[in-house]
Image: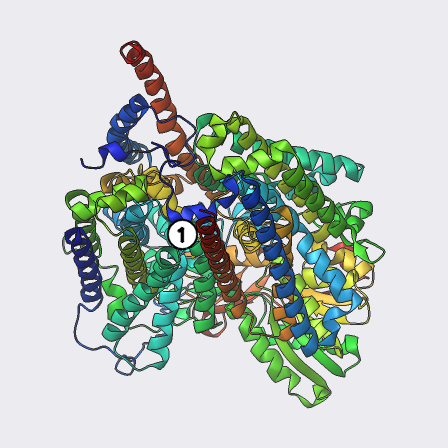
Amino acid sequence: MSAYRRGLRVGATGLTIAALLLSATACGGTTRDDTDNDAGAGNQASGAANPNAALREGLKIAFLPKQLNNPYFTVSDNGGKDAVTEIKGEFKEVGPSEASASSQVSYINTLSQQGMDVIVTSANDPNAICGALNQAKAAGAKIVTFDSDTKPECRQVFVNQVTAEGIAENQVKLISEQIGGAGEVAILSATANATNQNAWIALMKTELAKPEYSKIKLVTVAYGNDDDQKSFQETQGLLQSYPNLKGIISPTTVGVAAAARYLSGSQYKGKVKLTGLGTPNQMRQYVKDGTVDAFALWSPADLGYLAAYAGAALASGQITGAEGDKFKAGKLGEFTVAKDGVVILGPPTVFDKNNIDQFQF
Amino acid sequence: MSRTGAVAPDQTAEHAPTDPGQQRRGLTERLLAVRELSLLIALGLLVLVTTLRNDRFLSGQSVKDLLLGCAILVILAVGQTVVIVTRNVDLSVGSILGLVAFATGTLFVSAPGTPWPVAFVLGVALGALCGVVNGGLIAVARVPALVITLGTLYVFRGVDYYWASGRQINAADMPQSFLRLGNQTVFGVPVLFLVALVVVAAVGFYLRSYRSGRELYAIGSEPAAARLSGIPVGRRVFAVFVASGALAGLAGVLYAARFGTLDAAAGTGLELQVVAAAVVGGVAIFGGSGSAYGAALGAVLLTTIGSSLAVLRIDPFWQQAVVGALILAAIGLDRLVALRVAARLRGRSAHGA
Amino acid sequence: MAHDSLYAAPPTAEAEPGAGRIASLRGLLGSWDAVIVVALVVVVLLAGLTVENFATGRNAQFLLLDLMPLALIALPMTLIVITGEIDLSVASMVGLSSTLMGQLWLSSGLSLELICVLVVLLGAVLGAVNGLFVTGFGLPSLAVTIGTLALYRGLSFVVLGDQAVADFPADWTAAVVRNIPGTSVPVVVVPLLLLAVVFAVVLHATPAGRALYAMGNNDQAATFTGVSVARTKFWLFVVSGAVCGLVGIFWTLRYASARGDNATGLELTVVTAVLLGGVSIFGGRGALVGVLAGVLLLGVLRNALQLADVDANALTIVTGTLLVASVVLPNAVADVRARLHRRRQRQPAAS
């Protein structure tokens, strides 16, 4: 009787010990202090750019968004598709059905196996997909990131919708105009992990510290996890916790739509102002019923379009991703690569009831 | 040969309702009442604490928000209860909800003039159809529900994704009369919540007072015994999954009306919340006991926790952890009460002898 | 085997437990492993012949690396499911291990070796909590681990909040993806194989392993064989937790990123692989060979379809269908066989 039990316990303990040993294989004692991290190893803009090189035809360009089934990425990938068609390349869109870095890695591996010329991706995690991207680069692919960047050394070019400063400036200005330059405001963000959101929020705080905004007080940052229902609940929580709240900034398309829906069905409609980054299709109704005065966004289609051209320019040798390289992006005109291989699409468009009907996305 | 012969002591307590004996039956009902009461107390305490910190929590607007917020979860939890009492589980409800919600949106986009009652009928029918797939596979092919509905969780969601292929349906695409349902109130009570109340009352009454309703408990307590006593187990289990699918379909239509913005991901991961609501509401995961009222209260409690954490400005990172701890506490408490009762029963029968 | 006479019908199986049915079920299930292995071979051959870039060394490396977490967790999961329990909290334990590793590396100043040991211990503690609720308090594991699924995932967000820790030493992150020199097989496959052998020996060649099957069939009867059911199950949950800790380390180093949402949703894939491998969800039957073949089958299918540019949405449908088919098919076949068998046996039984 006890033999079995002992056998099992010995087995279990043995396994645990084996696991421990496995995990402590190298007994050097690696601590955080003695690893100097090669942060910012720099952009490997090797070789010289030839701005006069013609765009190669038949380039295989693949788009790997954060996830499929996300309308925002569907629109931007379609923009990319238009660009690829213009330059007579082969377009492909692949991606996981849920936004996770690990499944993106497996797609990057697949793409590099398939010998893609350009991989255009939006990173679910700035570090997690780096290894796979570097392998793909070693296999000959050019890497362009858009919307969400990786570490600079893992890609050649990052196509940024707008500078983080630009967004922070725009959002703070919009809310200040709407609440008359004074009062309490709150931010409704996406997930607490979202790199770009956190960067924007940090810069909004800097922006709010300027003297012209001294009468505006940022009371809190809430996280709606880019989940409609959660964002809805968080908006509701904000209004209850801060009775003097005058305005909400929600720099995420999911959050701003949920917050608008909550406000439009509540007693706060029109009294508490809301602005943020949203798509005209989602927000049209709330702009028309007076819940929202104005909000902003770049064109996701143009973003994809520009990213595809940047990739083609890289693969054709027009640019290497070094600062100062110039390339033409079809209907959008000429762009210059800035520091760290960043290309900027341009200032966001502000939508209000006068112009919103001109936009369909 | 079957489990009837040698029921472990711990199973006796869990499956107390099996015994048709009058005394035990009364006791089970009392136990359930105790459960519902303690849920109400927990809910009351939660609201009290939150209100003390912030008196806006009990304002009309806030109560309306709460009722609106819990309606969909309540309907799903009630549907899940019907399944769980038969010792099955339906993990595909979140995917069914997503599929039906998207179908509803698509219906309005492709046939703009559709009156909203038609959307309701079609939505419930589509949900029921998904339920037929589940129930058919389970009852006919005699395969465990957990596995089948885990599979159809993927399949229904995949179909939904495939169909939507990245499209999104916006509030502007749906008729105002339909969207208004999602926010309208009657005497200050949201319509959505009234719908949920009707569902709870109907299912609760059915489970308690109909012969076939009681038979579901018998099936969950001891399938073999239920079959021996002439209950058409296969047919009942099939019907249960169709009902669960139909309710998920109803929830899907309501979801569309309430949220207005729809993509293929609607309701992802909802199944765990639904099971959690039922478990917190006192529905035993291995069948045979639990009530629709309890499950509904469980759903209200979970939603209220979500809202009050937001109001109390507790670090949002804690929210999921709290829900998990609550589930553990709820099942632990159930177990404790069941043991107590079992001990008392033993004591009583000893006196009798 | 000692527990032959203790075979009972699974709790919700609809069929009456006739002796004929059981005999043919076992006969068939003996061959279910074979079916999966054959299916695996067929899929690999087909993919190798028809899918471009499939049969390359690099692809093998990617495939195996992607499968590591799944394969590792499937080992203890198999044992747990065989005893009739389930552990749905595995992915959350991986997530919590990963963020804890990140937090310790970020702020404790301990050596990474020590941190790894601590993380595996933490995993074991998390598993012990599951085990305590299930065996100590006698609660259904399905409900308990749904609870801890939420709890551990929530805690993993509490540990690191909105941060992601990424500055792990490069030689460590490179080590986990390195190949065995001269091959395209990652070195991490070696510990996996060692663990698999240990688990297989415990399950198939020790009295304790046989007792696991007895438990899955009937707790009561298992108790009569002299095995402490509660204690055994408790330790299984502990082992499951420890392995998840190990996977947490692997995950963190492979993706060089410790963050709260690591491995979200992995539990469903693990359960799918285990069931696909022929383990009964009611406990009492299944083998490790089948499970490992199931893990590989799942991975190879996904990889090949991905390389063939099949939509991710179709992959979701394929996974679901595979799972349903893997339980419907054997049951349907067993049914037909049982019916035939009974017909043959009826005469002698009646007389």
Q: Position of residue A315 (x, y in %)?
A: 41, 56
Looking at the image, can residue B234 be seen?
Answer: yes
Number of callouts: 1
Instruction: Please tell me how crowded label 1 is: few (under 14), some (14-19), or many (20+) other residues with Cα within 10 Å.
Output: many
Label 1: which residue?
C141
Where residue A276 sits, quadrant-wise, is bottom right
Label 1 marks a residue whose chain is C
Instruction: Looking at the picture, tell me which residue is in the foreground, C333 or B269.
Output: C333
- The foreground one among C256 and B253 is B253
Drawn side of residue A245 relative to residue B280, left or right: right
Q: Position of residue A155 (x, y in %)?
A: 41, 64
Which residue is found at the position 72% from the left and 87% from the top? A212
Q: Is residue C285 or residue A333 the one in the foreground?
A: C285
Q: Residue furthest right?
A: B187
- In x, y percent, where is residue A25? 17, 67
Q: Residue at x 43, y 39 (%)?
A: B147
- Label 1: state its secondary structure: helix
Depth check: A151 or B324 in front? B324
**Picture quarter containing residue A304?**
bottom right
Instruction: Work out which residue is located at the far bottom of the displayed protein and give it.
Output: A211
Q: Is residue A36 left or right of residue B205?
A: left
Q: Residue at x 39, y 26 (%)?
A: C16
The residue lying at 38 percent from left, 37 percent from top is: B3
Q: What residue type is disc 1 on?
A: Ser
Tell me if residue A142 can be seen: no
In the picture, measured across the screen, residue A16 lies left or right of residue B126, that is left
